[in-house]
Amino acid sequence: MTARLIDGNALAKKVRGEVAQQVAALAAQGRQPGLAVILVGEDPASQVYVKHKVADCESVGMRSVLDRHPASLSEATLLQRIRELNADASIHGILVQLPLPKHIDANKVIETISPAKDVDGFHVASAGALMIGRPGFKACTPYGCMKMLEAIGCDPRGKHAVVIGRSNIVGKPMALLLLQANATVTICHSATPDLAAHTRQADIVVAAVGKRNVLTADMVKPGAVIIDVGMNRNDEGKLCGDVDFAGVSQVAGWITPVPGGVGPMTRAMLLVNTLEAAQAAARA
Ligand code: GUN
């Protein structure tokens, strides 16, 4: 069996098109959505991510403000800058690119962002809303994964989903979104003794560990849907995910490629969240 590909680039393009239409409608009322992206320091990967996020805003007609600061920026100054952006009516979303330099407490920074502008979905208010099934911003990567399942017609209801990884950014919110969609959810992690025993039972596997070949063909139920959140480099320096793509695609029913899978969808869902924030501000 050869798996069908879930094309994240194509789906992200469709999402951006839908967002662009709604941005135009808001802009016509003089309410152009605005995203502030804060980058502290010179981390090369973060610089690339931030550049993409700013370009994405432009591509759908949103305003973006790139706020760059040296790694020596004090925590107090960063918190003050966030408070200014909280009070700025032309800014609807605030994103602080992680990781932050060690002298800055990321939790404190995230908690300073107004929950109404928390388009990353990282604030405890957003995480708590998801936990109890209330409306709130969803973290962009798991939100994008859910969109991918929807796009291929995979309804999680009654399915067994295995999430590998328990980060606050992906694993935990992913598990909660799948649960909300009525899947039976298992969360596996570094202390899980027999990962394969779980993944072999799964109709849906989401791999979000950050390590190559966490999921191999012998660990997958034939026909399963495989979502690969990993972003790693192989021995040749090429981008690869957590899943052994060559092997697993012989067994799975559907699979996301890396690159061109979850990554573009994460970026697209940031635009969706920013649009939602601007629409909510327009209603207020
Ligand atoms: N660093 C890596 N991924 C992310 C993300 O989704 N949001 C932010 N703010 N920082 C990140």
Image: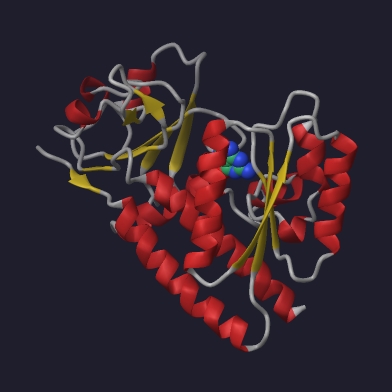
> Does 216 appear above or below 146?
above
Q: Is residue 29 left or right of residue 141?
A: right
Judging depth in this view, the residue of 187 and 38 nearest the camera is 38
The colour style of the image is secondary structure
Residue 176 visible here: no
Residue 247 visible here: yes
> Does 18 appear above or below 218?
below
Residue reaching furthest left? 1
Location of the N terminus (image quadrant) = top left
Q: Residue at x 59, y 61 (%)?
A: 273
Which quadrant of the render holds ligand 1? top right
Q: Is residue 232 left or right of residue 272?
A: left
| Residue 246 image point, x, y percent | 18, 29
Location of the C terminus (image quadrant) = bottom right
The quadrant holding residue 163 is: top left
Judging depth in this view, the residue of 227 and 162 nearest the camera is 227
| Residue 259 image point, x, y percent | 33, 40
> Does 191 appear above or below 55?
above
Judging depth in this view, the residue of 163 and 233 nearest the camera is 233
Q: Residue at x 85, y 34 (%)?
A: 74
Total labels: the figure holds: 0
| Residue 132 image point, x, y percent | 67, 50
Q: Residue at x 41, y 50 (%)?
A: 264
Q: Residue at x 72, y 28 (%)?
A: 101
| Residue 216 image point, x, y percent | 26, 22
